[in-house]
Image (spheres, rainbow, N blue to C red):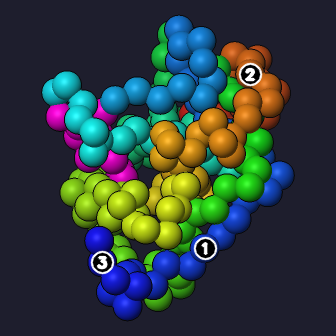
Amino acid sequence: MPSPVNLRPLKRYTLDGDHFFRLVKNCHVEGLGVGWGASRFVPRPASPPADRDYRALYAARDLDTAFAETVLRDEAVGCFDAFPIPLKVLQIWDVVEILASDLTLADLRNHQALVARVATDALHAQVHDEGQKLGREIYDDPRDFAGLIFQSRLTGVENIMVYDRAISLGLQSVSRQPLLKCKAFAATLDRFALSIV
């Protein structure tokens, strides 16, 4: 374990009563559930998963970002007209509203990422190698961060990533509804110039 003088200079940020959103496939009963797999800050686990492997929950400050990060991603790049999304793609998703309380995260927003000497690719590259190294480092950090807060590479809005060890301690599912029944989703479609087909 590194000594305090060799630790990355990460700023602590505590969420207390903050609301976030995530999209969950409606075949999954648990709104705060997480599965095994690789993502921006989570390396691919061993098969079967080993003691050092971990999972994580991602959530966004607004519905636009939750949708962009989970469903849209880079699919519409190069399409200069309204981008068509099949109805059947949207029908499988639910929107879960999450309350975050007493959750201390590593702050990687704005200039904090620069202060913490984090590589740009760790936060914004489409390839996740650097981000996964950073996620592992923060997971192992003796300061015991519950996860991290960062800005979406797609919208610039705040996202959180919470390690599986902290989900039950700091997150609560407030509400859940089908994406297509969410009134705010109509505005998301307009803002991103999307059409349902």
Horizontal and vertical percent position of residue 22: 61, 35
The mark lying in front, picked from 3 and 2, is: 3
Which residue range is magenta in the image? 37-46
Above or below, comparing residue 30 to residue 139 in the picture: above
Residue receiving disc 2? 176
Which residue lies at the image location 53% right of the left edge and 8% below the top edge?
27
> In the rendered image, which quarter contains the N terminus?
bottom left
Q: Name which of mark 1 and mark 3 comes first in the sequence.
A: 3
Figure quadrant of residue 169: top right
**Mark 2 vs mark 1, CA separation in Å:** 30 Å
Amino acid type shown at disc 2:
Arg
Does the image show residue 131? no
Residues at discs 2 and 1 in contact (Cβ within 8 Å): no
82 or 101, nearer to the observer: 101
Residue receiving disc 1? 12
Horizontal and vertical percent position of residue 79: 40, 42
**Mark 3 vs mark 2, CA separation in Å:** 42 Å
The tag on residue 48 is none
Which residue lies at the image location 34% right of the left edge and 29% below the top edge?
36
Residue receiving disc 3? 2
The mark lying in front, picked from 2 and 1, is: 1
Horizontal and vertical percent position of residue 103: 67, 56
Rate crowding at label 3 as few (under 14), some (14 to 19) or many (20 or more) other CA atoms within 10 Å.
few
Examine the residues drawn in magenta and state their main secondary structure.
loop
The mark lying in front, picked from 1 and 3, is: 3
Amino acid type shown at disc 1:
Arg
Q: Name which of mark 3 and mark 2 comes first in the sequence.
A: 3
- Magenta includes 33? no
